[in-house]
Image (tube, rainbow, N blue to C red):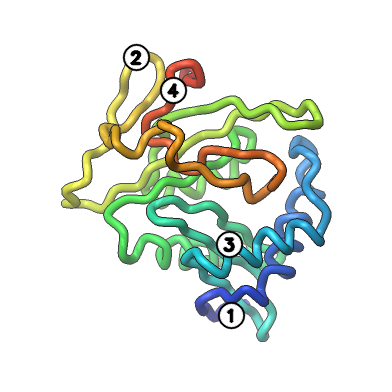
């Protein structure tokens, strides 16, 4: 399957939301996602203001990646496009003009976490998220740093990994709605986790 890539547009929001909802439907441990209408409205707003790219096959969007500042808030592929290299290209596009990036993936999402490790990202922290429907999931923060970058590398502290970038930490300044579940609020960039949210490494 041959893919082409371009900058995402707000009109791509419906298909992006559909890709996320299809992923949620095939993932038994995932919390209940929002309906297509509100999720499309959410992504329309995001694609209007954040950096984003889509992968296409035969002019059909089959994957997308969104980055806000140094944080990747979404990287999803349709089932038919997985394992064919499109995810790597989308991630590379997000890395291109950054010295470092952060991306979150649920602990249970083993395939995504294996992909991020392969692409040079390392785990730096964990948080426990509990949703309105009672589902609790451990969310794992991963960090990539460009080689020879002046940005500090992640370090360990006690039983959890933290970063030296203290000014970008969980001080309440950097948080966005969770793109998977817009009714929730989630810290999308948390290089310095609050100690009460830190979980021991497993």
Which badge, 2 or 3, comes first in the chain's sequence?
3
- Distance from Cα at disc 4 to Cα at disc 2: 13 Å
Write the residue at 29% across / 32% down: 166
Which badge, 4 or 3, comes first in the chain's sequence?
3
Q: Is residue 77 above or below residue 160?
A: below
Binning the other alpha carbons within 10 Å of mark 3 as few (below 14), some (14 to 19) or many (20 upward) gives many
- Distance from Cα at disc 1 to Cα at disc 2: 46 Å
- Distance from Cα at disc 2 to Cα at disc 3: 36 Å
Q: Which residue is mark 1?
A: 2
Q: Is residue 182 above or below residue 79?
A: above
For label 1, the SS is: loop
Which badge, 1 or 2, comes first in the chain's sequence?
1
Binning the other alpha carbons within 10 Å of mark 4 as few (below 14), some (14 to 19) or many (20 upward) gives some
- Distance from Cα at disc 4 to Cα at disc 1: 43 Å
Which numbered circle lies on residue 194? 4
Quadrant position of the N terminus in the picture:
bottom right
Which numbered circle lies on residue 46? 3
Binning the other alpha carbons within 10 Å of mark 1 as few (below 14), some (14 to 19) or many (20 upward) gives few
Write the residue at 71% across / 66% down: 80
Q: Is residue 2 above or below residue 137?
A: below
Which badge, 4 or 1, comes first in the chain's sequence?
1
Asked where in the image residue 151 lies, by quadrant, the reply is top left
Which badge, 3 or 1, comes first in the chain's sequence?
1
The residue at the far front in this view is 173
Q: Which residue is mark 2?
A: 158
> Is residue 97 something one can see in this rendering?
yes
Asked where in the image residue 9 lies, by quadrant, the reply is bottom right
- Distance from Cα at disc 4 to Cα at disc 3: 26 Å
Q: How many marks?
A: 4
Q: Position of residue 3 (x, y in %)?
A: 57, 78
């Amino acid at each position: 399957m041959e893919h082409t890539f371009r900058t995402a547009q707000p009109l791509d929001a419906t298909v992006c939301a559909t890709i996320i909802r299809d992923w949620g439907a095939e993932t038994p441990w995932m919390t209940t996602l929002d309906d297509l209408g509100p999720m499309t409205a959410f992504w329309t707003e995001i694609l209007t203001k954040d950096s984003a790219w889509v992968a296409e096959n035969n002019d059909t969007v089959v994957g997308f990646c969104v980055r806000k500042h140094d944080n990747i808030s979404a990287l999803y592929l349709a089932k038919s496009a997985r394992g064919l290299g499109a995810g790597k290209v989308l991630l590379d596009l997000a890395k291109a003009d950054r010295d470092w990036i952060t991306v979150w993936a649920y602990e249970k999402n083993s395939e995504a976490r294996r992909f991020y490790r392969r692409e040079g990202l390392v785990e730096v922290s964990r948080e426990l998220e509990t949703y309105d429907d009672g589902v609790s999931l451990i969310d794992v923060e991963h960090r990539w740093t460009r080689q020879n970058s002046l940005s500090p590398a992640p370090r360990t502290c006690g039983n959890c990994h933290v970063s030296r970038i203290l000014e970008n930490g969980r001080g309440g300044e950097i948080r966005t709605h969770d793109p998977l579940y817009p009714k929730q609020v989630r810290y999308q960039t948390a290089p310095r986790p609050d100690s009460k949210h830190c979980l021991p490494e497993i």
